[in-house]
């Protein structure tokens, strides 16, 4: 199981983390990954303070430079690396 954590802290929420959740859910449905990916919310993971984009972790590894605009592309690339 691949664990994806998305920050629901206020700074990430303002920058569109809820849109990232929707994009991730679309990606999971499109690729039939329902049994392979667990999505969880997380409190602030300091990505906002370190200016590395939205707070997203895959299997505990911070994914940098994710925005609400590029999330589907970045998450797709990262998840295909793990799941293919
Ligand atoms: S509020 Fe999301 S990383 Fe800080």
Image (cartoon, rainbow, N blue to C red):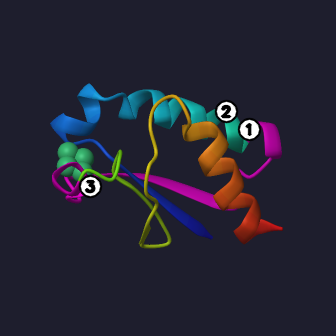
Badges 2 and 1: C-beta atoms under 8 Å apart? yes
Q: Cα distance, mark 2 to mark 1?
A: 5 Å
The answer to whether 12 is drawn above or below residue 38 in the figure is above
Say if residue 14 shows up in the picture: yes
Residue 29 numbered tag: 1
SS class, disc 2: helix
Question: Disc 3 designates what residue?
Answer: 47
Give the extent of the magenta segment: 29-50
The foreground one among 18 and 54 is: 54
Q: Quadrant of residue 27?
A: top right
**x%, y% of residue 16?**
36, 28
SS class, disc 3: helix
Tell me: is circle 3 under 8 Å from ligand 1.
yes
How many C-alpha atoms fall within 10 Å of the one at disc 1: few (<14), some, or many (≥20)? few
How many C-alpha atoms fall within 10 Å of the one at disc 2: few (<14), some, or many (≥20)? few
How many C-alpha atoms fall within 10 Å of the one at disc 3: few (<14), some, or many (≥20)? some
Query: First in sequence: mark 2 or mark 3?
Result: 2
Q: Quadrant of residue 15?
A: top left
Query: First in sequence: mark 3 or mark 1?
Result: 1
Residue 26 numbered tag: 2
Q: Nearer the viewer, mark 3 or mark 1?
A: 3
- Magenta residue check for 64: no
Q: Residue at x 46, y 31 (%)?
A: 68
């Amino acid at each position: 199981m691949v664990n994806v954590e998305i920050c629901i802290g206020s700074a990430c929420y303002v920058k569109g983390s809820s849109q990232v959740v929707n994009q991730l859910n679309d990606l999971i449905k499109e690729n039939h990954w329902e049994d392979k990916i667990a999505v969880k919310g997380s409190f602030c993971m300091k990505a906002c303070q370190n200016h590395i984009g939205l707070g997203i972790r895959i299997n505990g590894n911070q994914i940098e430079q994710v925005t609400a605009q590029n999330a589907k592309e970045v998450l797709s690339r990262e998840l295909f690396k793990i799941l293919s």
